[in-house]
Image (cartoon, grey):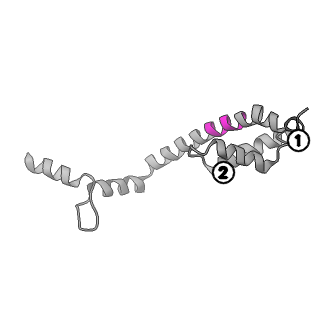
Amino acid sequence: MAWYEEQEISFEDARKSVKNSLKNEKMSHWILEQCLQDEYKKYNSFGSYRGFYTFAEPSILKVARRKNKIARNKALQTLKRATPFEIWINHILYRPTSNEQKSLRYEELKANFESQ
């Protein structure tokens, strides 16, 4: 047997591997840690290097992506319902333009209003 079939992967190596697999995705740190700990608690280890990369890592990535999507959607819904956020967005979009602050829609709406 080869060393990668016998030697157990450490928690730190597993964390680095999973983070490396998700480096191009925006992933909440706490979700990733929770998924790693949940998988580790199931079997009290991640198993061998070969077993981790074959079975555990894909499982961790799948669960982490699903939980991250749910958490992002929940956060977005919370922001959409937040009145202060809505007021702030309207302020950014429709405030009159000044030397320091630029409005995103004010000039366009002002020109449209004056042309009618």
The amino acid type found where label 1 is placed reads Gln
Question: Which image quarter holds the C terminus?
Answer: top left
What residue does disc 2 label?
Answer: 30
Tag of residue 106 = none
Q: From this viewpoint, is residue 18 visible?
A: yes
What residue does disc 1 label?
Answer: 7
Q: From this viewpoint, is residue 34 visible?
A: no
- Say which residue appears at 74% left-offset and 44% top-offset: 36
> Percent position (x, y) of residue 77?
49, 44
> Percent position (x, y) of residue 109?
19, 50
Pick whichever, 95 or 54, lies toward us.
Answer: 54
Count of labels in the image:
2
Instruction: Say whether residue 73 is left or right of residue 20.
Output: left
Pick whichever, 114 or 8, lies toward us.
Answer: 8
Question: Which image quarter holds the N terminus?
Answer: top right
Residue 15 vertical placement versus 103 (above, below): above
Q: Nearer the viewer, mark 2 or mark 1?
A: 1
Question: Which quarter of the figure has residue 96?
Answer: bottom left
Instruction: Say whether residue 23 is left or right of residue 116.
Output: right
The amino acid type found where label 2 is placed reads Trp
Q: Is residue 107 magenta?
A: no
> Percent position (x, y) of residue 51?
81, 34
Q: Is residue 65 magenta?
A: yes
- Say which residue appears at 81% left-offset and 38% top-offset: 49
- Say which residue appears at 62% left-offset and 36% top-offset: 66
Main secondary structure type of the part rendered in magenta: helix
Q: How crowded is the residue under tag 1: few (<14 C-alpha within 10 Å), some, or many (20+)?
A: few
- Say which residue appears at 73% left-offset and 37% top-offset: 57
Give the residues drawn in magenta, as a range.
Answer: 59-66
Q: How far apart are labels 2 and 1 at the CA level?
A: 28 Å
- Circle 2 SS class: helix
Task: Point out the tag, 2 or 1, that comes first from the N-terminus.
Answer: 1
